[in-house]
Amino acid sequence: MDESFLTDDKRAEQALRERDAKIRGLFDANIIGIGVGERDGRLIEANDAYLRIVGYDRDDLLSGRISWMAMTPPEWINRSEKALSEFALTGAAQPFEKEYFRKDGSRVPVLVGIAGIEGTETHIIAFVLDLTERKLAEQALHEGEVKIRRLVDANIIGIEFWDYDGRILEANDAFLRMVGYDRDDLIAGRVDRDTLTPPEWRDYVARRVVDVKINGTIQPYEREFVRKDGSRVPVLIGAASFHESANQGVAFVLDLTERKRAEEELRASEARFRTFVDHATDTFMLHAEDGTILDVNRHASESLGYSRDELIGMAPTDFDPDAKTVFHQRMRERLGAGEILTFESRHRRKDGTEFPVEVRVREFEGRRVSLTRDITERKRAETEARENERRYRETQAELAHANRLATMGHLTASIAHEVNQPIAAAVTNANAALRWLSAERPDVEEVRQALRRIVENGNRAGEVVGRIRALVKKAPPRKDAVSINAAIREVVALTHGEAAKNRVSVRTQFADGVPLIECDRVQLQQVILNLIVNAIEAMSGSNHAPRDLLVITEKAEPDGVLVAVRDSGPGLAPETLERLFDPFYTTKANGMGMGLSICHSIIEAHGGRLWATPNLPRGAVFQLTLPANSEPS
Ligand code: ADP
């Protein structure tokens, strides 16, 4: 249509229609909230966007229930009235921020602009923008800033703000402390990336800066800073750029001095431990739970002949022939309970040779640690000690035998007399029998009696000889159940002649029910014989009467026996008492001085005790105890 044909009125009318259509279009587009209201605040029209913002629906609108005034919270009323005055004066109000109450009572932040509607005096049109999203974003930003500020001020970690030119724009105290600069240095621009970076780190740091530029952030990495005084400080540093101003960023810096020192210390102590373990003269092994070797010290390789690499991965059964039997389930349980196990075993070297070991094992943090000691030397010493002991016992036995022979030699005269007596009696009886037989009428009865006496005398002589033979016989030590009383009675009988010759009266006082003693009968008799002979000899030297010898047996607690030999001789001088049991100690011109020493060792070998005390009123007492189950050796 050619507009030149239109009248002015028509043109104006058309313009108005077009503008109305535009407003309607804006209204219906619902991009922003649009509401039309009375001056008193009652809303008479609104688009969907408006209703959505304030949370009302179209029915609320039609019933006239929505009012600007009612929707405005008290603290915003002033601001709204100011806008209305502005509108009254100029016909419009600049957009301003305020809040509305929604229908549900919650609040919504909005940007509101007001304008009049041409042709109506009373109607106002309001444009409303929902600011919720923007407010939330602002709040988040603010909270983020507050958090960062707090982090900066807390000075727990060092924080610096930098730009890509290497300037340090700001830093907290923790950072400055770390690098040894003060705030004046910072303000004067004396602290920058280059100054802080050691030369050998510069290339690396430059690459990290590029990374931040490309990715916005980098993973923390370890490096060093140069302090103001030139010293170095190890740090962990992470950085990020600010999105808003891409030329700047922030870095978080952690001082690693302490951690490095601790690491260093740990390394040093591990090295020390390793040296210690490697220089140890025992084998150390670390085992997995199933026994597999995880690590060994140097001595392990030296003693077994395998290299460390060969040993790692081996099982103890590979070099310990007894490991299987030694390491049964029960041991495993005890290890699990935290016990340290010690046992002896054998180890086999790579070349096949074996050596005895003592192994100690304990569990440690789910693993097993073993310490193995080569006990070849100890075993050799033990064998040697056993051998020495055996030789010593042999020598003792020889000596004891020699001593018995000597004692018996000493008693020869008395014993010969003892044997001679029954033989002489037998001869006398034989002569008598012959006489009875050669009579005219032989008296058979007399002859029978004479012959019976001959048998008795023969037996007596045989017994004496038998006892002597038993006593001087060289026999290995043995263990019998010996009746102490019977054994002593035999010895007393043997010395009977000697006692009589020296005018010594011998008495015995044997307790009933003395237990049998497990011991070597001959050795025990030798001891008693020595004590009796010594007592007789001691008393024979003095001219004082009486010469009394008393041999006593008693039950000793708990189940042993006590024997005492008391004499009324000169007794024991203090210096004699001290050395009585020493070998070769004698006060006699032709004494050997071995008797008591041998007696002492015999009684000790049987687990008993032999000691001497003075007798009252005079003389000496030798006493010995023997346990019931003594072990003759
Ligand atoms: P020996 O009889 O060959 O001297 P012993 O070892 O039997 O060797 O005795 C050592 C010493 O102990 C004797 O020389 C003597 O001095 C002393 N002695 C042993 N028994 C008695 C005793 N009953 N009374 C006094 N002295 C004794």
Image (cartoon, rainbow, N blue to C red):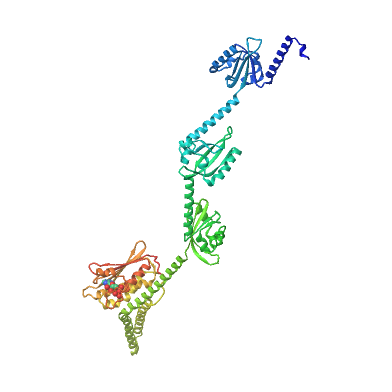
Farthest residue in the left direction?
A: 544
Q: In this image, 294 relative to 229: left or right?
A: right
Q: Residue at x 56, y 15 (%)?
A: 82
Q: Position of residue 447 (x, y in %)?
A: 35, 85
Q: Position of residue 10 (x, y in %)?
A: 74, 10
Q: Is residue 120 above or below residue 421?
A: above
Who is closer to the viewer here, 109 or 122? Answer: 122
Q: Is residue 322 visible?
A: yes
Q: Position of residue 222 (x, y in %)?
A: 53, 44
Nearer to us in this view, 352 or 311? 311
| Ligand 1 placement by image quarter | bottom left
Q: Is residue 183 above or below residue 361?
A: above
Instruction: Report the front residue among 485 and 517.
Output: 517
Q: Nearer the viewer, residue 99 or 23?
A: 23
Quadrant holding the C terminus: bottom left
Q: Is residue 346 visible?
A: no
Q: Position of residue 379 (x, y in %)?
A: 46, 66
Q: Is residue 91 left or right of residue 596?
A: right
Q: Quadrant of residue 99?
A: top right
- Place residue 418 in its image quadrant: bottom left
Which residue does the image show at 51% across and 50% down from the upper left?
365
